[in-house]
Image: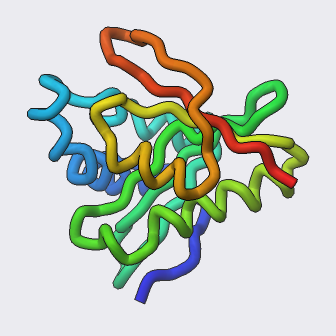
């Protein structure tokens, strides 16, 4: 049984890094190198950003990283352990991000993803996100998406 999202603590950072590596591992061959989330500093992220985790049996099985911006809440990262994909955790975290954005007074959420992560783009589109642009960012072909709230 998975618990509701809770705010990550500094001691969660190693588990978050392990989770993210497991979640993004399948994209390495498709993209040709490690996706950016696999190289992020989760010790710093937990301290500087709004990071949330979902646990199952005491293990971190999903994570969400949010960054408040001027007029929008950015979903910097969302990751679900491959052993728990297909259980609705991604959608749960997206709904949680929407609730947090509204609670914090943001009119919209935005996110970005690699164009080769097509299943993610499909999920985000089904959840109401719309493409707002594309660009090459740090050598990656990135799709930007946004969802207005309310």
Measuring from the top left, give residue 37's x and y in whole percent: 36, 34
Q: Is residue 100 left or right of residue 26?
A: right
Which corner quadrant holds the N terminus? bottom left
Residue under the image location 45 percent in, 69 percent down: 89
- Image vertical order of residue 146 relative to residue 89, above or below: above
Residue under the image location 31 percent in, 39 percent down: 117
Which corner quadrant holds the C terminus? bottom right
Measuring from the top left, give residue 11's x and y in whole percent: 44, 55
Residue furthest out toward the bottom: 1
- Image vertical order of residue 103 relative to residue 69, above or below: below
Residue under the image location 54 percent in, 27 percent down: 144
The answer to whether one can see residue 41 in this image is yes
Measuring from the top left, give residue 73's x and y in whole percent: 72, 39
140 or 61, which is in the foreground?
A: 140
The answer to whether one can see residue 9 in this image is no
Task: Look at the image and name its color scheme.
Answer: rainbow
Count every numbered label the image shows and give the total: 0
13 or 74, which is in the foreground?
A: 74
Q: Is residue 53 left or right of residue 102?
A: left
Q: Examine the image and state in which quarter residue 4 appears.
A: bottom right
Residue furthest out toward the left: 29
Q: Is residue 127 left or right of residue 88?
A: right
Measuring from the top left, give residue 21's x and y in whole percent: 24, 45
Q: Is residue 122 left or right of residue 33?
A: right
């Amino acid at each position: 049984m998975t618990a509701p999202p809770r705010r990550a603590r500094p001691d969660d950072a190693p588990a978050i890094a392990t989770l993210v590596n497991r979640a993004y591992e399948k994209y390495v061959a498709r993209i040709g190198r490690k996706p950016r989330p696999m190289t992020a500093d989760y010790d710093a992220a937990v301290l500087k950003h709004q990071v949330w985790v979902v646990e199952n049996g005491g293990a971190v099985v999903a994570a969400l990283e949010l960054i408040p911006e001027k007029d929008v809440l950015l979903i910097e990262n969302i990751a679900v352990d491959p052993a728990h994909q297909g259980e609705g955790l991604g959608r749960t975290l997206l709904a949680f991000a929407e609730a947090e954005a509204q609670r914090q007074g943001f009119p919209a959420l935005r996110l970005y993803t690699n164009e080769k992560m097509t299943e993610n783009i499909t999920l985000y589109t089904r959840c109401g996100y719309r493409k707002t642009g594309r660009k090459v960012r740090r050598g990656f072909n990135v799709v930007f998406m946004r969802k207005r709230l309310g």
